[in-house]
Image (cartoon, helix red, strand yellow):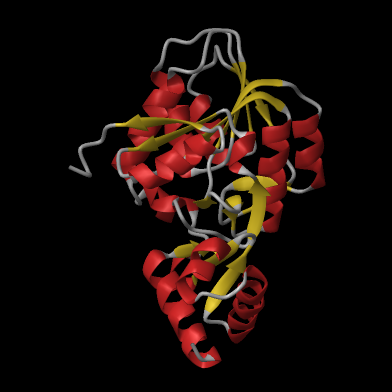
Amino acid sequence: MLYEERLTKIVEFVNKKKSASVSEIKDLVQVSEVTVRKELEALDKKGVIRRTRGGAVSLSSLVLEYTEIEKEQLNSAQKRAIAERAYEMIQDSQTVFLDAGSTTFELARCICRGTRRGIIVVTNSFKIINELLRRPDIELVFAGGCVRNKMMSCVGSITEDIITSLCYDISFIGANAVSIEDGISTPNLFEATIKKKMVDSAKRAILLCDSSKFDSTSMAKICPLGRFELLITDDGISSSFAKRCKAIGLDVVVVETGKHE
């Protein structure tokens, strides 16, 4: 197979699958893994695919950052169902961290109308703090810092210092993009740093993510999927993605939404 023909075939394969590993591409074009990696680098430089650790993804699978208001409108039924299941993980008298995001905001709503007592909630989200102020019995800690208007949240060194100075029984984290090869990622470097510190500071880290985020990547990596104890998602998850999660030791809880029958 000629060089240009091989590159065309690789691009078509990656675009069709949304993501592909070096091993899969090697079997497709019948060259060595070293050659595949070189050709993926060349295609990345041309701007036709994105090279990732262990393979490549199509540009159509890359994720941009929406505002909080925009994100609330996306897959809202799935996010509510995921949040309701996540709420069941919380016990009385626990210290809980809620990441800034639309699914964790739904979890804050569950907490607000729920029956858990004696819990402490830490967050860097203005929206979550505002929601939970309706529950005066819940102790709130706001991780303030530099304000990101787009996300209605705080980031930066002050926020990081607050997060790392506390211990959490459980952290609930969202993500803009999730892939087996690259873990979870987000379009913003500051958000990525905050999320990583949330994961590292918790006894239990749980990923809340609707199925539209799978097999995609964004600019800033947060951490590997294996750093989470559990993934809670909706019934749009493919059986192959669920199997790949379990293969790396990540337990998956699937909630029924009726949206994928």
Q: Quadrant of the C terminus?
A: top left
> Which of 97 and 209 lies nearest the eye of the viewer?
209
Q: Is residue 212 visible?
A: yes
- Drawn side of residue 99 relative to residue 239, left or right: right
Residue at x 46%, y 71% (from the top left corner): 28
Residue 166 rendering spot, x and y as whole percentages: 76, 24
- Drawn side of residue 220 relative to residue 174, left or right: right
Residue at x 62%, y 62% (from the top left corner): 219
Residue 181 rendering spot, x and y as whole percentages: 58, 53
Residue at x 44%, y 51% (from the top left corner): 214
Residue 212 rendering spot, x and y as whole percentages: 38, 51
Residue at x 47%, y 63% (from the top left corner): 19
Q: Is residue 57 visible?
A: no
Q: Is residue 160 above or below residue 96?
A: below
> Which of 236 and 114 lies nearest the eye of the viewer?
236
Residue 71 rendering spot, x and y as whole percentages: 42, 52
